[in-house]
Image (tube, rainbow, N blue to C red):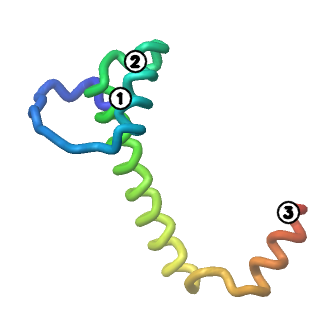
Amino acid sequence: MMKSMTRRVKIAVSLPTELVDGARAAVRAGRATSVSAYVAEALEQYANTGDLASLVDEMLAATGGPMTDEERAWADRVLDN
């Protein structure tokens, strides 16, 4: 979590009602300290996912690209999927 970041910037965004309701419910349930904290954590997780996707793309490029259909079928058999 980005708790160490102390500088905050106030912005206004428009969100679907369902997302706001979910954020407020998380605050009521004690899973977030505020709606702002909930949104900040969601954005951080999204940013980390993008970093992970970039890392996976780099690894795939370094090893010959995405798996072929045959490689995927083999992995599914080995992993019992």
Q: Say whether disc 1 or disc 3 marks the residue closer to the N-terminus.
A: 1
Q: Distance between the residues labelled 2 and 1?
A: 8 Å
Q: Say whether disc 3 or disc 2 marks the residue closer to the N-terminus.
A: 2
Determine contact: label 2, label 1, CB under 8 Å: yes
Q: How many labels does the image show?
A: 3
Q: Nearer the viewer, residue 67 or 25?
A: 25
Side of 61 where 10 appears, left or right:
left
In the image, residue 49 sits, relative to residue 81, either above or below, namely above
Q: Which residue does the numbered mark 2 point to in the structure image?
A: 27
Q: What residue type is labelled 2?
A: Val
Determine the residue positioned at 80% across, 71% down: 75
Determine the residue positioned at 40% across, 18% down: 27
Local SS, label 3: loop
Q: Which amino acid does label 3 sit on?
A: Asn
Q: In which quarter of the image is the N terminus?
A: top left
Q: Say whether disc 2 or disc 1 marks the residue closer to the N-terminus.
A: 2
Side of 42 where 65 appears, left or right:
right
The quarter of the picture where residue 16 lies is top left
Determine the residue positioned at 35% across, 33% down: 20
